[in-house]
């Protein structure tokens, strides 16, 4: 009986050794890959601009406020078109109106508010591929304030219409960069690259050119800078031979 138990134990040890040996061999072969990250980046200049502003009117009478708003809008359009921007590029949005209030006090104690008039704001948008022209007009629009027109101007946003093509170019650039890195590593290790096992594109980033703008995990899309830099990474995993 003891001999039978010893035989079973010996067989079990041999089987265990074979299983462990196979697992080690599988782990060894599974690890025979090279993983690299390549970079593709390029600077470019925006070819589209979007400028937003608002005409604001305040008056004690709602009727008078709307009348003044129409007059001020005509002057704004006249000013913008006189600088070379076509009328059809100026798009006015629906006006927003609301009451204005003044706080009331009695013996230093707050007792409520009273209506002092109305405030109407109408936003406008100008979208154009003539970046320099719209940029110039947006900087000079404040001169209308001297005519008594209350206008609020936002900083323009800048875009690039060739972004889709640029993304493809950068992915190709990053892929080539990653492969060169992998080939260099394989050469130093005395082996050769095999088939591509996996490829993963990183987050597409657009930042201002020559800035210290940080990258975002979800991707950055800068619209405040006319001159930009696009960046993307590719993570490649190769088998080795």
Image: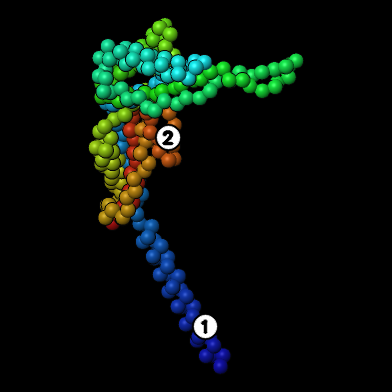
Q: Secondary structure at mark 2?
A: loop
Q: x, y percentage for residue 102?
A: 61, 18
Q: Residue at x 72, y 16 (%)?
A: 106
Q: Secondary structure at mark 1?
A: helix
Q: Which label sits on residue 138? A: none
Could you tell whether 113 is left or right of 8 in the image?
A: right
Q: Residue at x 26, y 20 (%)?
A: 87
Instruction: Specify the farthest residue to the top.
Output: 146
- Does residue 193 lie above or below 231 as drawn? below
Neighbour tally class for label 1: few under 14, some 14-19, many 20 plus, Cα within 10 Å: few
Which residue was labeled with disc 2?
Answer: 215
Marks 2, 1: nearer the viewer = 2
Nearest the viewer among 53 and 214 is: 53
Instruction: Specify the farthest residue to the right.
Output: 107
| Mark nearer the N terminus (2 vs 1) | 1
**Which image quadrant is residue 101 in?**
top right
Quadrant containing the C terminus is: bottom left
Which residue was labeled with disc 1?
Answer: 9
Q: Residue at x 37, y 27 (%)?
A: 93
**Which image quadrant is residue 124 in?**
top left
Q: x, y percentage for residue 118?
A: 51, 20
């Amino acid at each position: 009986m003891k001999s039978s138990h010893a035989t079973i134990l010996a067989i079990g040890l041999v089987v265990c050794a074979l299983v462990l040996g196979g697992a080690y061999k599988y782990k060894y072969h599974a690890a025979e890959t090279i993983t690299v990250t390549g970079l593709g980046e390029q600077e470019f200049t925006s070819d589209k601009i979007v400028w937003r502003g608002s005409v604001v009117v305040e008056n004690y009478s709602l009727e008078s406020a709307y009348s003044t708003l129409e007059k001020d809008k005509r002057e704004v359009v006249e000013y913008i078109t006189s600088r070379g921007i076509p009328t059809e590029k100026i798009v006015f949005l629906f006006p927003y109106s609301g009451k204005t209030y003044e706080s009331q006090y009695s013996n230093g104690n707050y007792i409520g508010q009273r209506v002092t008039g109305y405030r109407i704001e109408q936003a406008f948008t100008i979208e154009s591929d003539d970046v320099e022209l719209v940029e110039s007009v947006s900087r000079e629009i404040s001169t209308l304030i001297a005519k008594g027109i209350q206008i609020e101007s936002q900083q323009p946003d800048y875009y690039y219409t060739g972004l889709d093509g640029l993304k493809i170019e950068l992915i190709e650039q990053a892929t080539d960069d990653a492969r060169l890195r992998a080939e260099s590593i394989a050469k130093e290790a005395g082996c050769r690259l095999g088939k591509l096992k996996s490829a993963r594109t990183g987050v597409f980033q657009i930042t201002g050119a020559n800035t210290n703008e940080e990258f975002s995990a979800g991707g950055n899309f800068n619209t405040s800078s006319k001159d930009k830099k696009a960046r993307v990474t590719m993570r490649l995993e190769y088998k080795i031979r």
